[in-house]
């Protein structure tokens, strides 16, 4: 039982390049989330998916797209990376329908955009 | 606009001291308040609080919620160097069947030996 996994762990991009961050969970959770964490800013929600086939914007969605590929996987795409997107990205999952209020986090992806 | 404010932002104490971390919030459709500990990478869950006045306790850590005054505190007694971390407070709302967590900025706690 791996919980929430993310790939890659580290990535360096040049401005304008694109990439996709992958997230998968094996806990059969319906809800999945993408956050970014910047110094002094706490965690900010980028997008979330209440269930397979649905996605919604969070606090800071600009510059990102997401895909809920299936119940297990939720990917985050940067189409044209900008230095302002340098951050640590966390994926999380939860199961609100079963009363599971806590969110389980992946290990994070450290992204640097030059 | 929903917001969560933590104080202090940074705290340095000596091993053995007791610390109190604060979290105040303004959130619509409040469901619960959660505390996380973040050391190096992903945050780890500490407590979830839904009712006022009921203390949650785990070892040297305890937390309580005041829904009338809209705040929570996290206490750590007899601190150890392993308690050094960033402590995050988050408030949960339920939107369209999915939880939305609004996070505070975090409190960076440093325990010196």
Image (spheres, coloured by chain):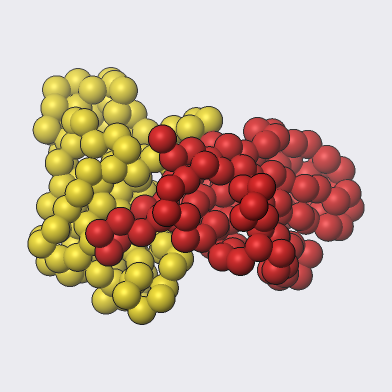
Chain colours: A yellow, B red
- Where A23 falls versus A36 (above or below)? below
In the rendered structure, the answer to whether residue A49 lies left or right of residue B58 reads left
The quarter of the displayed image where residue A94 is located? bottom left
- Where B35 falls versus A83 (above or below)? below
Q: Can residue A21 be seen here?
A: no
Residue A96, given in percent of the width and then of the height, sits at 35, 70
Q: Which part of the image, by quadrant, shows the C terminus of chain B?
A: top right
Q: Can residue A83 be seen here?
A: yes
The foreground one among B63 and A66 is: B63
The foreground one among B61 and B70 is: B70
In the rendered structure, the answer to whether residue B13 lies left or right of residue B47 reads right
- Where B86 falls versus A101 (above or below)? above
Residue B28, given in percent of the width and then of the height, sits at 43, 48
The quarter of the displayed image where residue A32 is located? bottom left
Q: Which part of the image, by quadrant, shows the N terminus of chain B?
A: top left
Residue B111, given in percent of the width and then of the height, sits at 78, 44
The foreground one among A103 and B22 is: B22
The foreground one among A34 and B71 is: B71
Seen at 54% across and 58% down, the residue is B34
Seen at 78% across and 64% down, the residue is B60
Seen at 25% across and 69% down, the residue is A30
Q: How many numbered discs?
A: 0
Residue B38, given in percent of the width and then of the height, sits at 56, 50
């Amino acid at each position: 039982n791996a919980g929430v996994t993310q790939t890659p762990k580290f990535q360096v991009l040049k401005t304008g390049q694109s990439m996709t961050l992958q997230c998968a969970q094996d806990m059969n959770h319906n809800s999945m989330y993408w956050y970014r964490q910047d110094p002094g800013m706490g965690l900010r929600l980028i997008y979330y998916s209440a269930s397979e086939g649905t996605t919604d914007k969070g606090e800071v969605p600009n510059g990102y797209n997401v895909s809920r590929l299936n119940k297990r996987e939720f990917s985050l795409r940067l189409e044209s990376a900008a230095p302002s997107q340098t951050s640590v990205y966390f994926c999380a999952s939860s199961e609100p329908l079963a009363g599971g209020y806590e969110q389980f986090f992946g290990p994070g992806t450290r992204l640097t955009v030059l | 606009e929903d917001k969560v404010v933590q104080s202090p932002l940074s705290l340095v104490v000596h091993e053995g001291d007791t610390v109190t971390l604060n979290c105040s919030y303004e959130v619509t459709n409040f469901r619960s308040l959660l505390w996380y500990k973040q050391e190096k990478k992903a945050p780890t869950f500490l407590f979830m609080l839904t009712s006022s006045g009921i203390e949650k306790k785990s070892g040297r850590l305890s937390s309580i919620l005041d829904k009338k005054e809209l705040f929570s505190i996290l206490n750590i007694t007899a601190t150890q160097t392993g308690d050094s971390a960033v402590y995050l407070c988050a408030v949960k709302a339920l939107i369209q069947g999915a939880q939305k967590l609004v996070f505070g900025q975090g409190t960076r706690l440093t325990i010196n030996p």
